Amino acid sequence: MALSEEKIFEIQERLKGLSPEEQQKKLNEILRELSPEELQDITQQNCLFCEISNKKIDAKTVYEDGIVMAVLDINPANKGHILIFPKKHHQFLFQVSDTETEHLFKIINKLSLAIINGLNAEGNNIFIANGQIAGQNSPHIVIHLIPRFKDDKIDFKWIPKKINEEEMLSIANLIRVNLDTAKQVKVNKQKSLDYDEEERVA
Ligand SMILES: [Zn+2]
């Protein structure tokens, strides 16, 4: 583990005598000072999905191999709602290696067909949230596979925004020139992508 006992002691010392509000502020400051490895260590501890893959927490497993695991969601959007995740701890899908991603989607396709054939689903949604703002509520990337049935009252609709031609061209260009850096997140962006510890669901 990258976060040493001395470092933990130092953090505790810096929080001594502060009010809960001041402690929260100080902790946010300290978190910003930590290295990516130290942050990874902190988030990996008590990670529900790492604990499921390490068999420390029971789950209704529907598929497992050396790379991925798929379990039933205990708070499903519909019956047969499956959570699929890489066993290795990654916060975002873009951090997962190409080989793991390829395998992950191969398994998602198999499960997608299994819920159609096995549960008589008429279709399914594959939902991925990268970042808290997108609805990510776990420090471990998870892919939701949701079987769909007629009149199941699940709604993924949004109101389309108006974007003019000039803006469209500029947006397309910004995306194209950033394709080579797709596996790295700029440090300032990483912060806003982080999930909120308090909103994490068990
Ligand atoms: Zn994890």
Image (cartoon, rainbow, N blue to C red):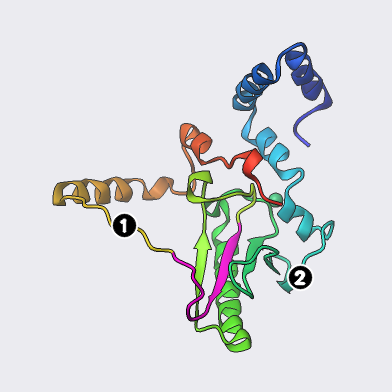
Please state which amino acid type lies under the numbered disc 1.
Ile
Q: Residue at x 46, y 36 (%)?
A: 189
Q: In x, y percent, where is residue 43? A: 69, 41
Please provide percent x and percent y for residue 85. Answer: 64, 61
Q: Amino acid at mark 2?
A: Lys
* Quadrant position of residue 29: top right
Q: Position of residue 11 (x, y in %)?
A: 75, 20
Read off the residue under disc 2: 60
Q: Is residue 146 magenta?
A: yes
What residue appears at the point 76 percent right and 60 percent down from the top-left corner?
Answer: 53
- The secondary structure type at the circle numbered 2 is loop
User: From which residue to which does the magenta span run?
Assistant: 142-155
**Image check: 189 left or right of 78?**
left
In-front residue for pair 130/118: 118
Q: Is residue 94 above or below residue 75?
A: above
**Disc 1: which residue:** 159
Find the residue positioned furthest to the top.
Answer: 17
Q: Is residue 196 left or right of residue 2?
A: left
10 Å crowding of disc 1: few (<14), some (14-19), many (20+):
few
Of marks 2 and 1, the one in the foreground = 1
Among the two numbered marks 2 and 1 on one chain, the one whose residue lies closer to the N terminus: 2
- 123 relative to 32, above or below: below
- In the rendered view, would you say 5 is above or below 97? above
